[in-house]
């Protein structure tokens, strides 16, 4: 049987308390993940935690499964990190560590989001000294760029061959 937990209205946020139709009990809510369509449960106990302890707004609901939420979060972090590294690069365009960090951040972002300027990362890697280029992380990153940029070129060239 699904657990039912009596709602402690006094523990809700002020905004929640003002809302209509405050339920009498927290009960498991079933929903489908917006991204992967998995069947999910928003447990009664978690609802109590969200609304009574964390004071979230009572109609704020999870839309995604835990896995998809983590993925989205990681993507967001990768984007923020890349933007930060590129900002540092503008300030210190000749600093090798800054260049290397920018390359790594572009590649990390691309691995998660499948978008970003890998050509730029390759161009950056050419500005590093041999020693820095040879470092394990930078080498892996530029290998990744080379593989994916070649992949893009292959896809672009296929239609032309069919035309001929
Ligand atoms: Zn999901």
Image (spheres, rainbow, N blue to C red):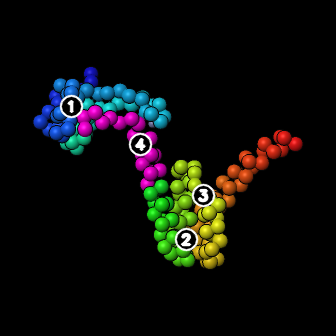
Q: Residue at x 14, y 38 (%)?
A: 11
Q: Which mark is residue 2?
A: none
Residue 154, magenta (yes or no)? no
Tag 1 near tag 4, CB within 8 Å = no
Write the start and end of the magenta stretch as one range: 57-77
| Mark 4 → mark 2, Cα distance in angstroms | 31 Å
| CA–CA distance in space, label 1 to label 4 | 27 Å
Question: In which quarter of the view is residue 68 placed?
Answer: top left
Q: Is residue 32 visible?
A: yes
The N terminus: image quadrant: top left
Q: Earlier along the polypeptide chain: callout 2 or callout 1? A: 1
Q: Mark 2 and mark 1: span between their CA atoms? A: 51 Å
Q: Earlier in the sequence, mark 1 or mark 4?
A: 1
Estimate how packed mark 1 is, as few (under 14), some (14 to 19) or many (20 or more) residues with alpha carbons within 10 Å: few
Q: Earlier in the sequence, mark 3 or mark 1?
A: 1
Residue 3: percent from the left, percent from the top? 24, 26
Mark closer to the observer (4, 2): 2
Image location (x, y in percent) of residue 126: 65, 71
Residue farthest along the top direction in this orientation: 1
According to the picture, the residue beneath numbered tag 2 turns out to be: 99
- Rendering quadrant holding ligand 1: top left
């Amino acid at each position: 049987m699904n657990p039912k937990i009596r709602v402690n209205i006094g523990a809700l946020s002020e905004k929640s308390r003002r809302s209509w139709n405050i339920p009498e009990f927290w009960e498991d809510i079933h929903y489908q993940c917006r991204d992967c369509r998995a069947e999910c449960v928003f447990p009664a106990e978690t609802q109590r935690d969200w609304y009574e302890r964390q004071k979230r707004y009572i109609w704020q609901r999870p839309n995604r499964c835990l896995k998809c939420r983590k993925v989205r979060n990681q993507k967001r972090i990768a984007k923020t990190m890349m933007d930060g590294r590129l900002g540092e690069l503008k300030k210190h365009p000749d600093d090798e560590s800054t260049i290397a960090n920018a390359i790594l951040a572009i590649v990390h972002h691309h691995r998660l989001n499948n978008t970003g300027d890998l050509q730029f990362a390759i161009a950056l890697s050419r500005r590093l000294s041999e020693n820095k280029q040879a470092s394990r992380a930078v080498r892996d990153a530029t290998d990744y760029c080379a593989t994916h940029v070649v992949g893009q070129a292959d896809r672009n060239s296929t239609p032309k061959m069919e035309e001929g």
